[in-house]
Amino acid sequence: MRKQLEALLPELQLIEETDLREKTIKVWVEAMERAGWGIKDLAEMPFTLLIKHTDVNLVTHTRAVTLAALKIAEVLLAQYPGKIAIQRDHLLSGAILHDVGKLFEYKREKGEFVKSREGELLRHPISGAAFAFAHGLPQEVVHIIAAHSKEGDGSRRTVEAVIVNHADFVNFDVLKG
């Protein structure tokens, strides 16, 4: 499963810190195993249940958010040299993991993806952050996951969390119509 996941999410290889890359992969693999999803399921799983019949899957969305976040970071660093610092590996890991909690938030019922009982109790930013924390990811990455959606509104976000939040909503808002 790991090799297939790495093929689906080639951005994993952009994380330079080996330990962080390995932990990021491990979180995805173990979340899939714990929630009972296979690689094929990821290609079918919608990135959101809020857009009826979307054909954008979770992997495509995760890649788009990750690449958008990386480009935003590159522009900010180029335009504001010496004014901001961005921890690139944390940004990448957080973007790649931002929706991993959806593996727990969703279930398949009569062939359709719907919200699971776990998803009714804890939205994906919370379950994803808890799962990442349990697997020893840095607090900065856990923060990005927890703060990427409305759960982070009103709280202080790190630069990396602001970038992932905006990259995620740009991707969502342009698709919702």
Image (tube, rainbow, N blue to C red):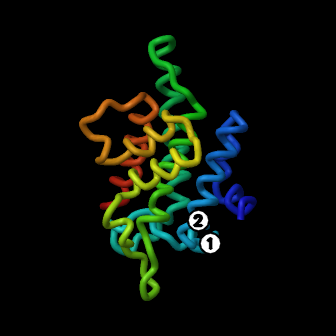
Residue nearest the observer in this picture, 104 or 55? 104
In the picture, measured across the screen, residue 152 lies left or right of residue 76, that is left
Name the kind of residue labelled 2 in the image.
Met
Residue type at mark 1 is Gly
Image x and y of residue 174, in percent: 36, 54
Kind of element beneath mark 2: helix
Question: Which residue is at 50% across, 52% downward?
Answer: 131
Residue closest to the far front: 134
Q: Position of residue 47 (x, y in %)?
A: 44, 63
Number of numbered discs:
2
Sequence-wise, the earlier of marks 2 and 1 is 2
Q: Which mark is residue 170?
A: none
Q: Position of residue 41 (x, y in %)?
A: 57, 73
Q: Which label number is shown at residue 32?
A: 2
Q: Nearer the viewer, residue 68 or 116?
A: 116
* Horizontal arrangement in the rendering, residue 59 relative to residue 130 (left or right): right
How many C-alpha atoms fall within 10 Å of the one at disc 2: few (<14), some, or many (≥20)? many
Disc 2 versus disc 1: distance between alpha carbons? Answer: 7 Å
Q: Residue furthest top?
A: 82
Q: Quadrant of the C terminus?
A: bottom left
Task: Find disc 1 in the rendering and name its residue.
Answer: 38
Q: Residue furthest bottom?
A: 110
Q: Is residue 36 above or below residue 11?
A: below
Q: Is residue 134 left or right of residue 162?
A: right
Disc 2 vs disc 1: Cβ atoms closer than 8 Å? yes
> Residue farthest to the right?
3
